[in-house]
């Protein structure tokens, strides 16, 4: 069956495009043209292998990565992701297509141009660290600088700076085999940062680390990214990792992009059963934000509403509680049960104010759901505010859990 | 029963004779003689030097080298073995053999390592090279002694040339192997930071292949030592001549003495070159610390003295 060709994913806004892949194909074997022809005729990877003995590594990959973004390519073994990342810095030459790095096509350029791009524009971090065992940590970090011919004193200084960024300055004169896995990978990261390259390629950098260290490294990377704003292309087989790190995520299967989008888009609307199977087990509370489950606040105004109108409104909307504002300022939240309990009193205006709970939970739109758990404890709706504190919407505690539930297959 | 020789006989022996005697020798003799020049220079220099150095000084220096590279046991063995060689009266011959072997290994290294590096970089070159190395290693050394004599004459230098041919394959093969066996992701890392092929070779591949290359050097050295007696056949000197003369005269004692000298030399050189290939990254003790330990062996060696 002919499969859909890869989704082309092009940025709409005005961010500078740092890396642009255009219709990249990779065929492994001695008859790539024949294999490509069969591919265009719609044959599958297996059929082509049977016929020609050649393997389709990557099919029609096209994507853009904007400056300062983290673009994650996710897939299982054999999906072609490692092949793809190696075509970005030319370690593997594509069979056809263009790979534009800051305007230079590294797939069709001279050796010298490629070398210059590698020295100044792209750095790479490897899954098994790839640290040179015969060099000290500092020499490893300074390797990219040595290649460029930078003198020893300056190399050492830059290496120490990079090591300080990953909190390993004390180990500059140790050897790689004296360090733990997590530390070695931080050296690998420092090596990638030392050359001041704007684009960082990371080939499953945390896959060889144990889970706790992996989480630490993901946090560290995000922390570094906040200050450094590198353009990062990150390969992983772990969807959770992709969801934590990726501004945009591409899911690869059999050499094609099956879906490209933000974490929320992929989890909320998986393109096919393959993606759905992946997303079934992930922690949705770390994907979705308060903004995605918020509903209009329907707030009451203390200046115009009374306890009576408040209860009526709640019955009309079917809600247990509503927030009360005074103009732009949020005063608190009133619960139906408090109002109905006090409704036997005569001074009704006082009741609304009395029933106000002023110590109420509030979050920003981009707060992830897992941070809402403790706030949901109160049973009150959680206010969603903008940066200035204005009420944008509310999140009912039960909606938080509704969003977390994996949709049952139809 | 019918066999191919009924139809056609190939006079291979005659052809080879014609090739070497009637074509190679008359036309290329000067060329081959000139090839000898660098070898002669190195050999004479080394031979003269080693024979001039007093025995004790040489022994002391070699013992220190052995100590630094291979440990105290080997150093002590070196001293005892060299003293023994002196006491059986074979010191000059041993120095001559040593200079021959070192000269041969030097040229093997200078020729063999670059060829190995080339082979590591090119599958095609490796494919062409392999059968050549196979031939070099399996042809009995006697077979190419004759053309060597015809082209180069007799004496020490032709002996060394024969040794070079015989001892070259291990260092070529192991250099090739060592470089090819460097971890692929390290090569990728070097490439991805924009190294040229030369930078990658010098900074990454060669240092990491060094251990294997030293193993190749060690094997080349051993083969060179084993050629020592055979080169005596074509007029080379040293311990090989002692053995050869002893054999000729049925002087079992003399032959044995020469043989023992060769073995002792082989053991010393083998241990030293093997240890040179070991990872050197342990913090080395300084020269002072080494001497201090010499006189107080009970103390454990301190590391990293200033």
Image (spheres, rainbow, N blue to C red):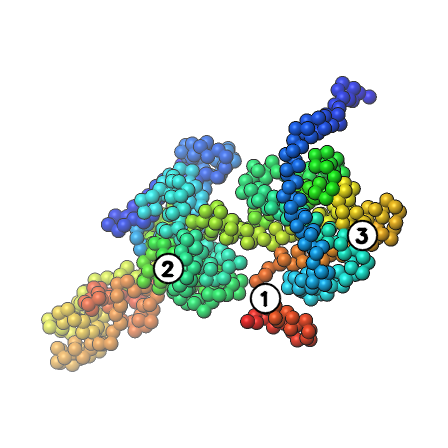
**Chain ID of residue with mark 1:** B
Mark 1 or mark 3, which is nearer the start of the sequence? 3
Asked if the residue under mark 1 is in contact with the one under mark 3, i.e. CB atoms within 8 Å, the reply is no
**Chain ID of residue with mark 2:** A
Number of marks present in the image shown: 3
Q: Which numbered dot is residue A278?
A: none
Residue B53, quarter of picture: bottom right
- Residue found farthest to the top: B7
| Most foreground residue, A262 or A218 | A218
Return the residue at label 3.
B259
| Image: A26 above or below A239 | above
Return the residue at label 1.
B284
Q: Residue at x 62, y 71 (%)?
A: B289
> Which of the two discs, 2 and 1, sits closer to the camera?
1
Q: Residues within 10 Å of mark 2 (few under 14, many from 20)?
A: some
Q: Which numbered dot is residue A244?
A: 2
Q: Residue at x 38, y 39 (%)?
A: A108
Secondary structure beneath dot 3 equals helix
Report x, y in % for residue B300: 65, 74
Residue A256 lies left or right of residue A289; in this view the side is right
| Image: A269 above or below B121 | below
Report x, y in % for residue A301: 14, 70
Task: Same chain for labels 2 and 1? Say yes or no.
Answer: no
Report x, y in % for residue B150: 73, 34
Residue A40, quarter of picture: top left
């Amino acid at each position: 069956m002919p499969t859909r060709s890869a989704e082309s994913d092009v940025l709409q806004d005005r961010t500078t495009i740092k890396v642009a892949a255009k219709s990249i194909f990779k065929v492994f074997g001695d008859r790539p043209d024949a294999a490509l022809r069969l591919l265009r005729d719609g044959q599958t990877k297996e059929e082509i292998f049977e016929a020609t003995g050649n393997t389709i590594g990557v099919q029609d990959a096209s994507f853009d990565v904007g400056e300062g973004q983290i673009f994650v390519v996710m897939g299982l073994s054999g999906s072609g992701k490692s092949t793809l990342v190696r075509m970005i810095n030319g370690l593997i030459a594509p069979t056809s297509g263009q790979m534009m790095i800051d305007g230079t096509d590294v797939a069709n350029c001279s050796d010298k141009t490629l070398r210059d791009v590698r020295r100044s524009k792209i750095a790479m971090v490897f899954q098994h660290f790839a640290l040179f065992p015969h060099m000290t940590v500092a020499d490893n970090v300074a390797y990219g600088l040595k290649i460029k011919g930078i003198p020893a004193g300056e190399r050492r200084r830059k290496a120490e700076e990079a090591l300080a960024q990953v909190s390993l300055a004390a180990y500059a004169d140790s050897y790689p085999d004296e360090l733990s896995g997590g530390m070695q990978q931080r050296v690998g990261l420092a090596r990638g940062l030392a050359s001041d390259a704007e684009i960082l390629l990371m080939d499953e950098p945390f896959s060889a680390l144990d889970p706790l260290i992996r989480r630490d490294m993901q946090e560290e990377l995000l922390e570094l990214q906040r200050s450094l704003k590198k353009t990062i292309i990150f390969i992983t087989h772990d969807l959770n990792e992709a969801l934590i790190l990726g501004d945009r995520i591409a899911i690869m299967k059999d050499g094609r992009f099956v879906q490209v989008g933000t974490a929320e888009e992929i989890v909320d609307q998986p393109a096919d059963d393959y993606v759905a199977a992946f997303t079934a087990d992930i922690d949705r509370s770390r994907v979705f934000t308060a903004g995605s489950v918020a509903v209009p606040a329907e707030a009451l105004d203390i200046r115009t509403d009374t306890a009576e109108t408040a209860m009526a409104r709640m019955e009309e909307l079917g809600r247990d509680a509503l927030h009360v504002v005074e103009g732009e300022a949020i005063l608190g939240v009133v619960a139906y049960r408090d109002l109905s309990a006090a409704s036997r009193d005569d001074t009704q205006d006082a009741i609304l104010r009395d029933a106000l709970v002023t110590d109420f939970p509030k979050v920003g739109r981009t707060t992830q759901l897992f941070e809402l758990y403790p706030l949901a404890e109160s049973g009150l709706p959680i206010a969603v505010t903008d940066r200035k504190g204005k009420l944008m919407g509310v999140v009912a505690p039960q909606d938080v859990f509704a969003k977390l539930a994996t949709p049952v297959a139809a | 029963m019918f066999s191919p020789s009924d139809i056609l006989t190939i006079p291979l022996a005659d052809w080879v004779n014609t090739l070497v005697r009637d074509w190679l020798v008359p036309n290329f003799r000067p060329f081959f003689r000139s090839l000898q020049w660098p070898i002669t220079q190195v050999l004479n220099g080394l031979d003269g030097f080693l024979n001039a150095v007093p025995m004790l000084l040489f022994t002391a220096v070699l013992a220190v080298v052995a100590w630094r590279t291979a440990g105290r046991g080997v150093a002590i063995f070196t001293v005892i073995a060299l003293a023994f060689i002196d006491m059986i009266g074979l010191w000059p011959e041993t120095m001559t053999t040593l200079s021959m072997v070192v000269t041969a290994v030097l040229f093997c290294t200078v020729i063999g390592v670059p060829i190995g590096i080339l082979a590591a970089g090119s599958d095609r070159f490796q494919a062409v090279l392999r059968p050549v190395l196979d031939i070099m290693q399996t042809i009995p050394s006697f077979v190419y002694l004759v053309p060597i004599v015809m082209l180069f004459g007799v004496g020490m230098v032709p002996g060394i040339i024969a040794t070079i041919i015989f001892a070259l394959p291990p260092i070529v093969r192991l250099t090739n192997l060592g470089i090819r066996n460097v971890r692929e992701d390290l090569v990728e890392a070097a490439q991805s930071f924009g190294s040229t092929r030369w930078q990658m070779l010098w900074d990454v591949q060669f240092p990491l292949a060094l251990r294997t290359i030293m193993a190749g050097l060690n094997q080349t050295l051993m083969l060179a030592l084993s050629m020592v007696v055979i080169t005596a056949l074509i007029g080379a000197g040293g311990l090989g001549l002692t053995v050869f003369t002893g054999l000729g005269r049925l002087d079992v004692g003399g032959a044995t003495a020469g043989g023992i000298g060769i073995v002792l030399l082989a053991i010393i050189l083998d241990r030293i070159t093997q240890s040179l290939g070991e990872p050197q990254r342990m913090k080395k003790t300084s020269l002072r610390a080494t001497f201090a330990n010499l006189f107080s062996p009970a103390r454990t060696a301190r590391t990293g003295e200033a």
